[in-house]
Image: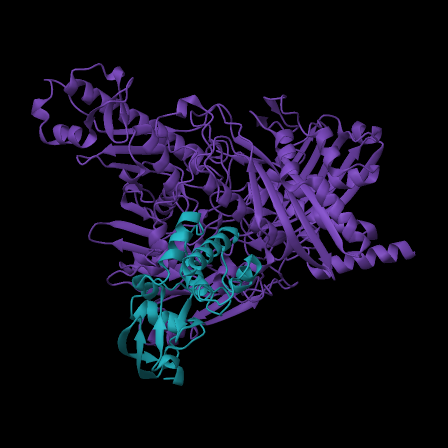
Chain colours: A cyan, B purple
Amino acid sequence: MTAAQMEHEITLTVNGFAVSERVEARRHLADFLREDLGLTGTHIGCEHGVCGACTVLVDGEITRSCLTLAVQCEGKSVTTIEGISDSGAVADLQEAFRARNALQCGYCTPGMVITASVLLDAEEMPDREEIRDHISGNYCRCTGYHAIVDAVETTLKARAEAGR
Amino acid sequence: MSGDVPSPLTALDRPNSYIGRAVPRPNLKRLTEGRGEYVSDISLPRMVHVVYVRSPHAHARIVSIDATAAKAAKGVVAVVTGAEIAQVCTPWVGVLSHMVGLKSAPQHPIAVDRACWQGEAVAAVVARTRALAEDAAALVEVEYEPLTPVTDMMTALDPETPVIHESLGDNLAFERNFSGGDPASAFAASDHVIEADFGFGRHTGVTLEPRAMVADFNPGTGRLTAYLGTQAPHMIQNILSIHLAMPESAIRVVCKDVGGSFGIKVHVYADEMATAALSKLLQRPVKFVADRLESFLTDIHARDHRVKGKVGVMADGTITAFEIDDVTGIGPYSVYPRTSAVEANQVVNLTGGPYTCPNYKARARVVFQNKNVTCQYRAVGHPIATAVTEGLVDLAAQKIGMDPVEIRRKNLVRDDAYPCASATGLKFEALSHHAALDKLLAMMDYPRLRAEQAEMRKKGVHRGIGFASFIEITNPGAAFYGVGGARISSQDGAVVRLDAAGAVTVQTSATEQGQGTEAVIAQVVATAVGVPLERVRVISGDTDQTPYGGGTWASRAAGIGGEAAWQAGKALRENVLAVAGAILQAEAGTLDVREGAVVDADTGRERMPLTELGRIVYFRPDTLPTGFQAELMAVRHYVPRGYPFAFTNGVQASYLEVEDGFVKLLGHWVVEDCGTILNPQLVDEQVRGGVVQGLGGALFEHCVYDSEGQLQNASMADYLVPMACEMPDIQVGHVVSPTADSELGAKGAGEAGTAGAPAAVMNAINDALSPFGAVVTDMPFTPDRILGALRAAKAAQGA
């Protein structure tokens, strides 16, 4: 057995719940979430950290779960699309995506929503170019991005309006 | 957000019509919450995972395969070779009889004695988990005898080039020659003849969800269920039936959520056939999920054309003749069952299509090579034909010093000229090139942009404006595949049912991959029946549950599947009114169904909610008149018969800046005429998404092979696709010329964006480079190529 195949006990928090599992050292976080925990909302597109479909939050930071080993998450708090949806934290953003048809096949959407979620609390209101820059690590092959930028912008404006 | 577009047709002008309204799609909430069910998410009891050992060589004889160590590895269920799979699954040949002369060689699910491209599967390793299968795959020892690969399509037909399939005699898969009018005389009489060579790099769809399949053969029932993200479930059912020697009725194809398709997922893939065969062989569910490397090596590629183009023009701007000579490399096999000759055939059909010019000569040659296969990807042939045509038109305009808009105005088929036909015999029912161009110019404020361009040029900033008019084939009837002998339905069907609680269920043979098929089907049925949209549920993508039909490809789901649903919905309303008439002792013709209730047609006064009608029909039929049988389920099918295709048209414009060879896109405008617009937001998003895929092919996307047939950039880090920060906002407008072939009048909208965008960008780049006398015609337009063109222009001027 190689070191990569050696199993390790890990304890972490996933979507607010404590999780203890034995995982192989080589198991990346995306596979751990999907295969071991059944959280299939995290999608795998490239497995080399480019497409962003597997984006999750690790201790509040947007993270490529395909480039993160499960064992690296010992003691950390992971939030997936399932968790962020259940909490209602970005329900307005998700509704904006729906209303604006900012998704077609939906495969990039969980990662896109999580990436966009950290923009919603920005101090300064980002313009469209800044929104585009921010989501550029998340590929979408269907929409051409325009509708996604619209949905994020609509949500930001509505939150700014509500905060006034 | 797109506003509602009220339908122009009185036939559709039902009270509370949803046609033309930008209602959101029904499935989006669950997808935004990560509650989708893609094939890669499916897990079944007893399921095992297959990993394919793939040839590292572009062309090699398989001398031996030693699977001893792999078979002994942890968790391994089986290691299976091509010869073993051939016992369960027969090979296929990707030809169509109406493509006269098209030839190809038998292709096996797994290579039997020879691998013909880098990435072709040579063995399958099946294990309890994907990771264990990959571990074991690394232990399979394959001895290869490398053969000389044929990689350069331009020399594939040379006598000294080895022939890939000896039995075929040469490397020519297909050739088509066409001549219409009198091109030789027309060129001879032209004031100017301009020639240019155009290149179109190989690219691929890069669906974000890689291809995936779960094949579940159940020996208890003798049935195979294939969970597959396919665009054409009944086609796959037929193909599996033929090659696994099972009756069609024993095969069920289920298509749940699909993570992107774009034409990539409408073909038969060797590894998917192997997965189905493995399930039959092992008598348990087998799951295959391509990783990204496999996607690049085995998802169909597209384009890879080199076209010599020629246009004749008079000094007054009249275009006199077009000529093209196209060569395309398709890999070692013509893809099954739609074939790999269609794209070149379309290039021949479509070049010059928007213009009145009757003189046209074309040749297309389709050649084999030892690279991955190519086949139909979004807008099949259109980006090539459009870029060649529009590139030549702009070069002609430049030659005679005419504005690119003016030369188009002079030569585009007049809006009052329909019906008419192209030089190649394509029949046009009703197009709107001039109205579309006028609208586009207004949207983009053309004079202002030209003034801005001139101002910027004074400051040494080089901006360009480029146009592309185009036609697009949609709503294909049987002409594409059926007449060529492929069992691919050109007809679609819909079953519409009213339940006791007043809910309406639609089963449709059109499929959903994110375009919004289910939304437009629901809108059409809600309108036709007369119920609120929320009461309509659409079922698609299951050969056990839906009518037999074609699916979603070639921009056909809304136009064909939508019309079938419209007709079925109307039939159900008639049936409902017959019941209501019997219950209410009224003439059915005096009643209507609106907002989920039977009403007096004249006054709109409610007579009975559908819930009450349903209660009576299902639970108290004894109270209905003797001999009356209510039928609250209706089925209708539709296939266009008036025209072989419903052509759409459109025009695009690109505004961009070139600096240090890099292209910065500043704006993009599209006016599209897809007939009746069922849902303006969905049409606009199809256009935008299509534009960006076209821009990807024009600027970034390229499968780069070396001379040994090795793909050099088979990762997302190296194969570039458009990112949000590189793309502009895209403004979309419409002209509406409905087809009279159907009552809805809807044509397709899924591919038009991809058809026109590369040409518009090419022309804009060349407009920006015009002060330097540089011209680029070889896509993708990388900084290296743009700088190369500038250097070449400088050298030519210096000489």
- Classify residue A53 by image quadrant: bottom left
Nearest to the observer: residue B240 or residue B162: B240
- Compared with B494, B236 (above or below) is below
Residue B587 on image: x %, y %: 22, 14
**B477 lies left or right of A87:** right
**Quick check: can you spot residue A161?**
yes
- Compared with B34, B532 (above or below) is above
* Residue located farthest toward the front when viewing the structure as drawn: A164
Q: Residue at x 24, y 49 (%)?
A: B222
* Residue located farthest toward the right when viewing the structure as drawn: B799
- Compared with B548, B221 (above or below) is below
**A34 lies left or right of B375:** left
**B631 lies left or right of A146:** left
- Classify residue B744 by image quadrant: top left
Nearest to the observer: residue A106 or residue B79: A106
- Classify residue B783 by image quadrant: bottom right
Q: So how many labels did they put on this image?
A: 0
* Residue located farthest toward the left when viewing the structure as drawn: B622
Residue B251 on image: x %, y %: 30, 46
Nearest to the observer: residue B711 or residue B569: B569
Residue A48 on image: x %, y %: 49, 70
* Residue located farthest toward the top when viewing the structure as drawn: B587
Q: Residue at x 73, y 49 (%)?
A: B464
**Quick check: can you spot residue B723?**
no
Q: Which quadrant of the figure contains the C terminus of chain B? A: bottom right
Residue B578 on image: x %, y %: 21, 20
